[in-house]
Image (cartoon, helix red, strand yellow):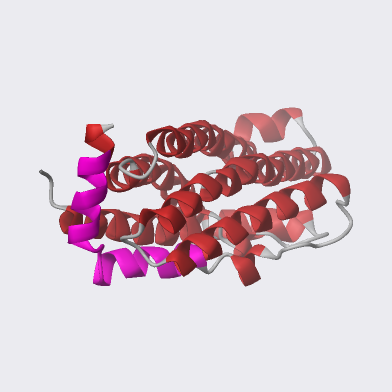
């Protein structure tokens, strides 16, 4: 029988690493709202950092796959179907997020290639850069639906597990609705800034920290595993 403590700590570590990579993969300091000229200049002045943020976003997608695999192994004794649903939502979110980085790569190519500056005027280039950066933003919003949806089955499994505190499951399920509200509001009300994830998304920090530091109740996990095998 696998070690649930080890699996929990691997999941917790990878989940925290995912958070760090995601943070650096979506840095707000490149964008100057309403001033595409300054945004373009800032990107070119910090090109290496901009490229690093793209790489960080791609690595976050890769790490996310390993996170959900570890969590699947940890939580499948509770309900295998719900655990599979959790995996499916992430496997839908990851390619959206990774392919979305093509928008930022295209914006960078437009800015640094002499061939494009020979065809387009400076204003046209800046307008195209603005378009692709906005497409990147909306790609994040679309992926955000799935980032939210995967939290609900995960939170449910944590809540029902008996070997992880129920409060963590509740916080994760609340975080699900935070992502859904954020993405829906941005699509429906683009002129309003809505970001409630910063208030309800703390479960994605507390939960991996709990897994990394405390792990799970091994006796209860083993009991739940034996029950699921005997069914």
Q: Determine whether 181 is above or below 83 in the image.
A: below
User: Over which residues does the magenta segment extend?
Assistant: 203-227
Whether residue 206 is in magenta: the answer is: yes
Task: State which quarter of the image contains the N terminus.
Answer: top left
Q: Position of residue 124 (x, y in %)?
A: 81, 38
Answer left or right for 131 relative to 13: right
The residue closer to the viewer here, 209 or 58, is: 209
Quarter of the figure with residue 64: top left
The residue closer to the viewer here, 76 or 63, is: 76
The prevailing secondary structure element of the residues shown in magenta is helix
Q: Residue at x 48, y 34 (%)?
A: 85
Quarter of the figure with residue 83: top left
Quarter of the figure with residue 79: top left
Question: From this viewpoint, which residue is outermost toward the left?
Answer: 1
The residue closer to the viewer here, 104 or 219, is: 219
Answer left or right for 167 relative to 45: left
The residue closer to the viewer here, 104 or 89, is: 89
Q: Residue at x 22, y 33 (%)?
A: 230
Q: Position of residue 161 (x, y in %)?
A: 37, 54
Answer left or right for 69 relative to 7: right
Q: Determine whether 32 is above or below 225 in the image.
A: below
Q: Determine whether 104 is above or below 175 in the image.
A: above
Whether residue 136 is in magenta: the answer is: no
Answer left or right for 185 relative to 177: right
Task: State which quarter of the image contains the C terminus.
Answer: top left
Q: Position of residue 20 (x, y in %)?
A: 41, 62
Q: Residue at x 52, y 31 (%)?
A: 92
């Amino acid at each position: 029988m696998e070690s649930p403590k080890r699996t929990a700590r691997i999941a917790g570590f990878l989940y925290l690493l995912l958070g760090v990579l995601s943070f650096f993969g979506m840095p707000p300091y490149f964008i100057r709202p309403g001033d595409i000229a300054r945004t373009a200049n800032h990107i070119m002045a910090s090109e290496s950092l901009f490229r690093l943020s793209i790489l960080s976003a791609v690595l976050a997608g890769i790490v996310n796959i390993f996170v959900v695999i570890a969590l699947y192994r940890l939580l499948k004794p509770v309900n295998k179907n719900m655990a599979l649903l959790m995996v499916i939502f992430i496997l839908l979110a990851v390619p959206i997020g990774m392919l979305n980085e093509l928008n930022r790569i295209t914006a960078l190519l437009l800015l640094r290639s002499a061939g494009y500056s020979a065809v387009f005027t400076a204003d046209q280039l800046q307008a195209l850069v603005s378009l692709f950066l906005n497409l990147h933003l909306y790609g994040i919003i679309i992926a955000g639906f799935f980032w939210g949806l995967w939290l609900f089955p995960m939170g449910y499994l944590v809540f029902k597990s008996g070997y992880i505190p129920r409060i963590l499951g509740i916080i994760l399920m609340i975080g699900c609705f935070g992502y859904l509200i954020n993405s829906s509001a941005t699509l429906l009300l683009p002129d309003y800034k809505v970001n409630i994830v910063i208030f309800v998304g703390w479960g994605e920090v507390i939960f991996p920290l709990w897994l990394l530091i405390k792990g799970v109740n091994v006796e209860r996990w083993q009991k739940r595993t034996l029950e699921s095998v005997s069914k």
